[in-house]
Amino acid sequence: MKYIDEFRQRALAQKLAASIQEEADSNRQYNLMEFCGGHTHAIFRYGVQDLMPSNITFVHGPGCPVCVLPIGRIDNAIQLLEQHNVILCTYGDMLRVPASGRKSLLKAKANGADVRMVYSTQDALKIAHNNPDRQVVFFAIGFETTTPPTAVAIKQAHMQGLKNFSVFCNHVLTPAAIQSILDSPEVRDIKSVSIDGFFGPSHVSTIIGSRPYEFFAKTFQRPVVIAGFEPLDVMQSALMLIRQLNEGRYEVENEYTRVVTREGNLKAQLLVAEVFEVRRLFEWRGLGMVPNSALQIKPHFADFDAERRFKLPAIQASDIKGCECPSILRGVKKPTDCKLFGTVCTPENPMGSCMVSSEGSCAAYWSYGRFRQPDDKTKREGVAV
């Protein structure tokens, strides 16, 4: 299959593994964070970690928009259902994410609320057209990848004069989150976790390009390699990061050249800029309040902003007791450090967002890696940042 089989060849994987083994300095530790959950799953599904020398560790970051959404925003969505009787449309991953009081959108639906799973923003618009007497709210989540379709839906609703459609906007921005991780006490001061380089997110980079990462690669002296999702993509990117670290270079390199350019998708960027503006502060699960890390709908399209239409309050909610999702999302702990993992928290009965989402670290460990991660591969030690 074009662009898949070429990146799963066993012989090439063996050659790359040999090159990594040869070039990795045995006297140092390499801790490489993959921001995107798709990379986490590729690493476990294809056993990439098993092909690495013992001094190369993959640190799993907050690369899933479902995982980083704080509980308070899900409480807001349930509030829309219970207090305003709206039709709430959202993507499937959101349905089982726990909210406060052991609630979830799926449980709200079971209790009679009108929650509908959609595959696109166009589905939500269609529901609004078919239900002119009901308010329809699209629960929008995602990184830069899913933001353009939401912008299209808002523009279409504006042009059509649709009065019963609005968007509960939870779109977040990747570069600000990476900068927040590098600014965190664990990395900067306490050094309980070391991050030497990043696998840059792939889907996000198709929209924003590789240029936005250049600032913190240089400022924080961490190399970034934009990596594809196939196993050979990840291995080649690991080799590129190791070479940069060995040579003392801190640059942005692009392994995923078949999709990503330095400039990104300019048409999509202009569309997003027309509809959205940067939100001054937004809460990320695991990272807390991160400045300039999310988007909100511009005043020109305020009629389609659910937060303004329904006057939604900011809700501060605590994570489930014992759930280590916040630490896992920062790369401070791994899923198997959580006492709930595999006991009361499983994919059938998720306690935290990292187990719910198909791209979550806990889901990846459960599906592919829970019995294969030796302790000596998961230690974060030996490297100053």
Image (tube, helix red, strand yellow):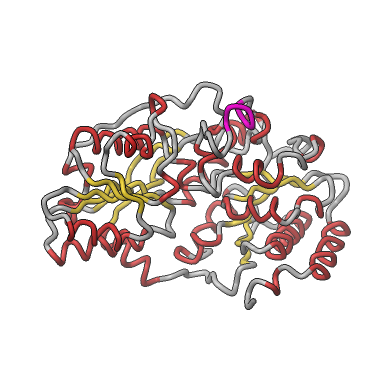
Residue 372, position as x, y percentages in the image:
77, 42
Name which residue lies at 63% across and 25% down: 339
Give residue 148's quadrant in the image: bottom left
Q: Is residue 95 left or right of residue 326?
A: left
Q: Quadrant of residue 2?
A: bottom right
Above or below: residue 101 compared with residue 64: above
User: Going 36% across and 32% down the picture, which residue do you hit?
Assistant: 72
Q: Quadrant of the C terminus?
A: top right
Compared to 45, does 366 lie above or below?
above
Quadrant where the N terminus is found in the figure: bottom right
Q: Residue at x 47, y 70 (%)?
A: 263
Residue closest to the far top = 321
Position of residue 258 measured from the top left corner of the image (x, y, whole percent): 59, 74
Residue 356, given in percent of the width and then of the height, sits at: 51, 41
Examine the rendered structure and indicate whether residue 137 appears above or below residue 342. below
Q: Is residue 94 magenta?
A: no
Q: What span is colored magenta in the figure?
A: 340-345
- 136 and 225: which one is in front? 136
Residue drawn 30% across and 33% down? 111
Q: Quadrant of residue 6?
A: bottom right
Majority SS type along the magenta span: loop
